[in-house]
Image: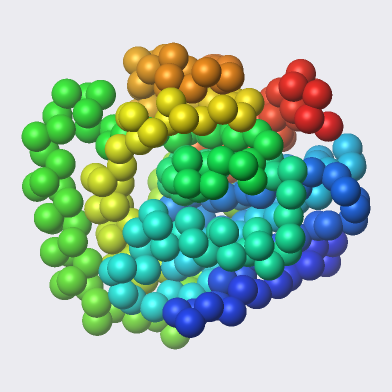
C-alpha cells in the first residue's frame, strides 16, 4: 500500500502517532499539504501528488488521526477540530515547511479552515473541495435537528465503544467504485465510535464570522449538485473571503477529490498558475 515514491513519516505525540507521506524533492519550492475526508486516508491524493511532482511542487498528505496508519485511540476529545489542527501544526513545524498551499477535502476542509484562521501567516493559498464553513443543516433550513443528531451520534459512539477489529482496512481511494462501495468500506477503516464522534463534531462547525479574516488566495471547488454544500453557501463563502474564486464542477457528487482525482488536480494547478504560485 505504501507508495515507494513517497517517504512515510511519523509524528510522535503524547496521545499517539500520526502517519504522513511526503515528497520533498524541491528545495525552496512550495509544499501542498493535503487533507482527506472522513473515513479515508492519504491515498485520496496519490494522483495529485504525482501531478504536483511533475510541475516541481513538494507535497505532504496525512492519514488524519483515527484514519489509515495513524493512532485510533477511542477518546472523544481527540477528534475535535482543534485536535486535528494541532496535529497539522506540529507536522508543519517539524518539517519546517513554508510557502504552504493548504488543500482540504470535505472534513479535511473543515480542518484547513480552522488552521488558516488560527495561523494565517503560514498559508500561501487555500483550496477547499466539497467543504462547508457551517453545519450544512443551516442552509437546508433544518438546523433545529442539529441537537438531536449530535446527541444521537454521540449516543451511538458510546454504545459502540466496545467495537474493535484486529486489523482495519486500508482503503485505496484510487480504486473507489461509486458512493455505496466507498461508504461501506469506509466504515471498516476505523472504529465506528470515532466515525460517529467526527460526524457529531460537524454540528459544531461554524466559521461564518471567522472566514472573513482569510486573506490568502482561496479556491472553492464544488459539484453542481453536492448534497451537503449548497450553491447558496458557496456564494456566501465567496462573498466573505475577499481573494477567492469558485469553480463548479459538472459532476453530481460530494466526492470530487476521491472519485475525480485527475480532473480536480488539473483545476488546482490551473488556479496556482493563475495566482503565480508555481
Residue 270 in sight from this viewpoint: no
Q: Nearer the viewer, residue 108 or 165?
A: 108
Quarter that holds the C terminus: top right
Where in the figure is residue 37, as x and y percent of width and height? 48, 49
As drawn, 89 above or below 178: below
Q: Residue at x 59, y 33 (%)?
A: 127
Quarter that holds the N terminus: bottom right
Q: Horizontally, is 69 left or right of 8 in the view?
A: left
Residue 197 position by quadrant: bottom left
Q: Horizontally, is 229 left or right of 136 in the view?
A: right
Q: Nearer the viewer, residue 140 or 14?
A: 14
Q: Residue at x 22, y 67 (%)?
A: 157
For the image shown, how many numbered marks are present on the structure?
Answer: 0
Where in the figure is residue 134, as x and y percent of width and height? 31, 34
Where in the figure is residue 67, as x and y percent of width and height? 49, 65
Q: Nearer the viewer, residue 267 or 168?
A: 267
As drawn, 119 above or below 3: above
Where in the figure is residue 164, as x and y percent of width and height? 34, 81
Q: Residue at x 71, y 34 (%)?
A: 265
Q: Horizontally, is 194 left or right of 71 in the view?
A: left
Residue 187 position by quadrant: bottom left
Amino acid at each position: 500500500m505504501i507508495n515507494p515514491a513517497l517517504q512515510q513519516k511519523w509524528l510522535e505525540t503524547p496521545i499517539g502517532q500520526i502517519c504522513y507521506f511526503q515528497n520533498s524533492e524541491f528545495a525552496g519550492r512550495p509544499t501542498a499539504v493535503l487533507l482527506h475526508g472522513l473515513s479515508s486516508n492519504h491515498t485520496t491524493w496519490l494522483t495529485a501528488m504525482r501531478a504536483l511532482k511533475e510541475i516541481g511542487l513538494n507535497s505532504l498528505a496525512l492519514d488524519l488521526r483515527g484514519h489509515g496508519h495513524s493512532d485510533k485511540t477511542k477518546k472523544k476529545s481527540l477528534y475535535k477540530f482543534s485536535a486535528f489542527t494541532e496535529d497539522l501544526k506540529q507536522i508543519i513545524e517539524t518539517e519546517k515547511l513554508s510557502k504552504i498551499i493548504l488543500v482540504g477535502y470535505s472534513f479535511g476542509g473543515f480542518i484547513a479552515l480552522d488552521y488558516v484562521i488560527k495561523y494565517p501567516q503560514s498559508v500561501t493559498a487555500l483550496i477547499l473541495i466539497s467543504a462547508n464553513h457551517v453545519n450544512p443543516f443551516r442552509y437546508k433550513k433544518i438546523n433545529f435537528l442539529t441537537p438531536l443528531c449530535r446527541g444521537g451520534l454521540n449516543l451511538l459512539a458510546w454504545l459502540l465503544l466496545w467495537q474493535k477489529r484486529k486489523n482495519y482496512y486500508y482503503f485505496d481511494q484510487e480504486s473507489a467504485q461509486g458512493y455505496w462501495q466507498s461508504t461501506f468500506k469506509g466504515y471498516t477503516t476505523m472504529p465506528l465510535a470515532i466515525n460517529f464522534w467526527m460526524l457529531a463534531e460537524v454540528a459544531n462547525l461554524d466559521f461564518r464570522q471567522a472566514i472573513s479574516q482569510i486573506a490568502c488566495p482561496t479556491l472553492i471547488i464544488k459539484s453542481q449538485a453536492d448534497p451537503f454544500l449548497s450553491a447558496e453557501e458557496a456564494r456566501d463563502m465567496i462573498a466573505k473571503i475577499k481573494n477567492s474564486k469558485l469553480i463548479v464542477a459538472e459532476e453530481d457528487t460530494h466526492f470530487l477529490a476521491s472519485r475525480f482525482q485527475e480532473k480536480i488536480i488539473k483545476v488546482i494547478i490551473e488556479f496556482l498558475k493563475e495566482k503565480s504560485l508555481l
